[in-house]
Amino acid sequence: MLQLFELDENEILIHRLWIIMMVFFIPFYGLILIYFSDEAVDNMFHRLVISLFWIVLLILSFTNKKAKKYLALPSYIGNFLTIAWIIWIVHVNRFSPDYTIGLYLSFVGMGIINRTNKEMVIFYAYCLIIISFSFYIQPDVIISKMVFILSLIIIFLIHTIIMGRRDYINQNLKLLNQQLIYKNGRLKQFLYAASHHLKSPLRGIGSFSSLLHSRFEGKDEEQEYLSYISKNVVKMDQVLDDVMDFFKYDREDIEVTSIDVDDILKKIKAYLYQKHDDLSLGLPLSYPKKMTANQTQMNQLFFRIIENGIKYNLSKEKIISVIYLEDNKHHIFSISDNGIGIEPKHRKKIFDLFSRLHHENEFSGTGVGLAICKTIVENHKGDIWLEQSTPGLGTEFRFKIPKNL
């Protein structure tokens, strides 16, 4: 049942804008009527209570995940109660022009958050029943009943036409989005399959170049050419591996569990200490040893950023420091090194796929590592950025992962 009231991000924005309008419109319109009309019969306490209801709903839409997702339900209930009160206060004032204008404005505004023609029909039928009852028990109203009913029908028809057009546009957008998702999926499948199938002929080229290399023993020029071929075969093989890794992690439907960050970092430290005698890796003194995330992807994230700090580092002692920070909603990790740093002109493209900042003779790599890190963080609804970097003095990367993932 609740699924009927589930909203996407655009609809949540529309509901919030409507709620803000209600918060201000209800009390301020009453103040204006009391100030300019000596005959106005009003109740500011009622208006403030209604406004308070919408304020609470607005706050909950920012602080409570479920209230945000199903914001339509309390909005609709609030609309029905609010319009009933507005019709009552208009009835008390015998449908005076000032109050009737406010009622018309309410009709126009409240139609905004109806998402289907069915909801629109229910809303206006409800309003028509209450107004008809009001006319029945109070026959001597100031305005023409026929003009009022016709005006209400016209507003309903205009809303219905707008709703129909909006539904048509939304359906087309959904269709285009589905086609885009489908084509992106096919493209990923093609690139992954192409990368996989290219490895077989590439291995063949590598094997035969090795055979030719032994056959041309003593012939320096031929062996130089074959060494060049072998070197590029190895490079291409690494590129294909990294491309396949990128598409393996480029997915939003990840499975998250409670993971042991302490265990991940200590295993990475033990592994890297075996490979690098000149490494000093400092881990956080205090941080949550458990967090909600995908175990494999978080392992890759930490490993690739730390490994980057080792690879692009010419210091005698490679010092890497992992620090844990946090705010109310996020786990934040800072990973800094004393490496070569990044030039300001390169900082905007460091997370792009195949973005290499140095010649391959200086540093090995394919330019895929940080792109994979960015993809992993985005899979976790987080963010990653270059906090600071000074050429020759080091780099600091930071990333944040939501606590309530």
Image (cartoon, grey):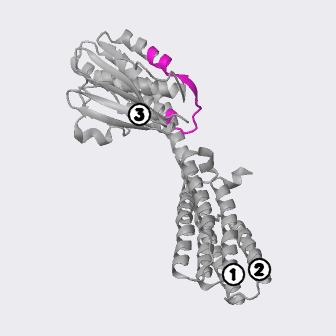
| Mark 1 Cα shell of 10 Å, populated few (<14), some (14-19), many (≥20) | some
Q: Dot 1 lies on which element? A: helix
Residue sitting at x 66%, y 80%: 93
| Mark 3 Cα shell of 10 Å, populated few (<14), some (14-19), many (≥20) | many
Residue closest to the eye, 253 or 338: 338
In the picture, measured across the screen, residue 80 lies left or right of residue 322, that is right
Query: Residue 185's quadrant in the figure?
Result: top right
- Taking the magenta stretch, the answer to whether it contains residue 290 is no
Which residue has dot 3 on it? 399
Residue sitting at x 49%, y 23%: 288
- Numbered disc in front, either 2 or 1: 2
Residue closest to the eye, 168 or 328: 328
Query: Residue 64's quadrant in the figure?
Result: top right
Please provide percent x and percent y for residue 217: 28, 12
Please provide percent x and percent y for residue 148: 68, 85
Question: Above or below — where is 166 with respect to 389?
Answer: below
Residue furthest out toward the left? 392
Residue sitting at x 53%, y 72%: 31
Task: Report the magenta residues as a range.
Answer: 248-266
For the residues labelled 2 and 3, the Cα–Cα distance comes to: 60 Å
Question: Above or below — where is 384 with respect to 306?
Answer: below
For the residues labelled 1 and 3, the Cα–Cα distance comes to: 55 Å
Residue furthest out toward the front? 38
Q: Dot 3 lies on which element? A: strand
As drawn, the label of residue 322 is: none
Which residue has dot 1 on it? 153
Please provide percent x and percent y for residue 75: 64, 59
Please provide percent x and percent y for residue 385: 36, 37
Locate the C terminus by quadrant: top right
Disc tally is: 3
Which residue has dot 2 on it? 132
